[in-house]
């Protein structure tokens, strides 16, 4: 039998992303272990901080082979254990000597921008947490995509202080900033917790979501998103897949290997649309009506002529207005609607790709796969594999 690895796990379970990482680690252990995990409570209980030195001594005595963790305030002490380690970064951009779980934050920001662009907004803003590198990177990706489309981004400058006593002051600043933005406006928040801050500020400022402020966040923590009123749209990242790959990297490190690449990259998969962006900010009524029809019936095999029948315009006139407002054709929008639905089915179900092709209006799997690759940049199979740990 293979040697039973002893692995210290320092990943809490309060966030959806962290729980996804743990599921991926557990899946790798099931397939290639099993591993013996130790999750010391003293690193998660606020009242037990005084016991952490004692806990570190226990960790040394336990005889662990490696550590997989989310960066925390005791990072330097944990690094001092001298064990192979893979860590999900939060405060630090790099952790010398350790494997790293790194989210492609620029891609998260770009995907959030694309989501709001599809809804036809003309004004955009970003609300982050300036002290964190990942928040700044998401803002950079968001702004870069919008600049490519010809739009400027208004960024919120958050207060420097981190003391809880300034919460009322920060809410006042946030309310003032939101009121100052031209409406309607598409806003991206760096993370779902930050989205909740924006929701609260909008509520106290009398601003309607999504009619005046459409809001998309990051990481798709379903518990937070669904508890919000209105529920929050958010960019989903492939945390489970990342956890699996992080465990595979740690396994190699515990075996004494020095992998050439010690960074596991977590990529965004799609935007989970909820009420906070369930709106089309299209001033042209004909284009808005056509878009509503496409989004409702895009997977029913409709063609461009079916869309034209919904508005009192000629095919040529509607095409011209589509290109002016959305920078793409009616046909392109139909394909995007189909592929958006296909991406959700690939991620959320185990339906075979041939069945998914039929569900979104394709009679031939080959045509579907080519269209999917053109829109999302990867094949349907590769997209599915990127969003979940191997079975």
Image: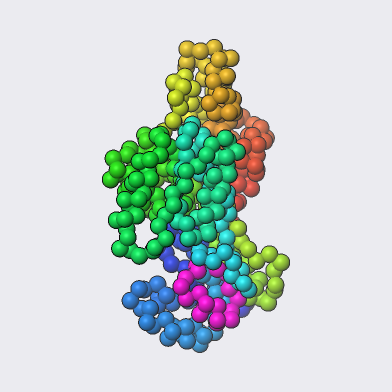
Residue 75 lies, in percent from the top left, at 50, 74
Image side of residue 22 versus residue 148, left or right: left
The vertical placement of 124 against 192, above or below, is above
Quadrant for the N terminus in the image: bottom right
The vertical placement of 195 against 83, above or below, is above
Residue numbers of the magenta segment: 70-87
The vertical placement of 222 against 372, above or below, is below
Residue 19 lies, in percent from the top left, at 46, 61
Q: Which residue is drawn at 40% across and 72% down?
A: 44
Q: Is residue 321 magenta?
A: no
Residue 272 lies, in percent from the top left, at 46, 44
Q: Residue at x 36, y 34 (%)?
A: 211
Q: Which residue is drawn at 51% across and 13% down?
A: 313
Image side of residue 51 versus residue 27, left or right: left
Nearer to the camera, 259 or 36: 259
Image side of residue 196 versus residue 10, left or right: left
Q: Residue furthest right?
A: 260
């Amino acid at each position: 039998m293979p040697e039973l690895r002893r692995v210290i796990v320092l990943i809490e379970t309060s966030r959806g992303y962290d729980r996804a990482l743990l599921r991926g680690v557990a899946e790798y252990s099931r397939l290639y272990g099993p591993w013996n995990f130790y999750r010391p409570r003293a690193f998660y209980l606020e009242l037990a901080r005084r016991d952490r030195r004692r806990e570190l001594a226990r960790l040394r005595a336990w005889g662990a082979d490696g550590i997989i963790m989310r960066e925390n305030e005791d990072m330097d002490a944990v690094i001092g254990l001298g064990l192979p380690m893979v860590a999900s970064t939060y405060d630090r951009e790099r952790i010398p000597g350790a494997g790293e779980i790194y989210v492609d934050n620029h891609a998260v920001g770009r995907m959030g921008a694309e989501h709001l662009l599809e809804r036809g907004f003309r004004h955009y803003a970003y609300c982050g947490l300036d002290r964190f590198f990942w928040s700044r990177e998401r803002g950079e990706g968001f702004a870069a995509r919008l600049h490519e489309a010809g739009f400027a981004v208004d960024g919120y400058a958050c207060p420097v202080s981190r003391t809880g006593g300034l919460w009322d002051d920060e809410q006042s600043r946030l309310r003032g900033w939101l009121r100052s933005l031209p409406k309607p406006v598409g806003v991206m928040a760096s993370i779902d917790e930050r989205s909740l801050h924006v929701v609260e500020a909008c509520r106290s400022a009398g601003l309607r979501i999504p009619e005046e402020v459409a809001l998309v966040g990051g990481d798709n923590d379903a518990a937070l998103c669904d508890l919000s009123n209105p529920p929050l749209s958010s960019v989903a990242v492939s945390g489970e897949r990342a956890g699996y790959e992080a465990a595979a990297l740690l396994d190699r490190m515990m075996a004494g290997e020095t992998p050439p690449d010690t960074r596991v990259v977590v990529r965004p998969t799609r935007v989970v649309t909820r009420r906070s962006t369930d709106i089309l900010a299209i001033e042209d009524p004909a284009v808005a009506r056509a878009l509503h029809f496409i989004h409702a019936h895009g997977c029913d095999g409709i063609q461009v002529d079916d869309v034209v029948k919904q508005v009192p315009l000629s095919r040529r006139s509607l095409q011209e207005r589509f290109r002016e407002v959305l920078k793409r054709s009616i046909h392109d929008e139909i394909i995007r609607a189909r592929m958006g639905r296909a991406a959700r089915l690939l991620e959320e179900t185990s339906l075979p790709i041939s069945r998914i092709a039929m569900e979104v209006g394709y009679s031939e799997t080959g045509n579907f796969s080519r269209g999917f690759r053109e829109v999302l940049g990867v094949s349907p199979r590769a997209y599915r594999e990127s969003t979940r740990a191997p079975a």
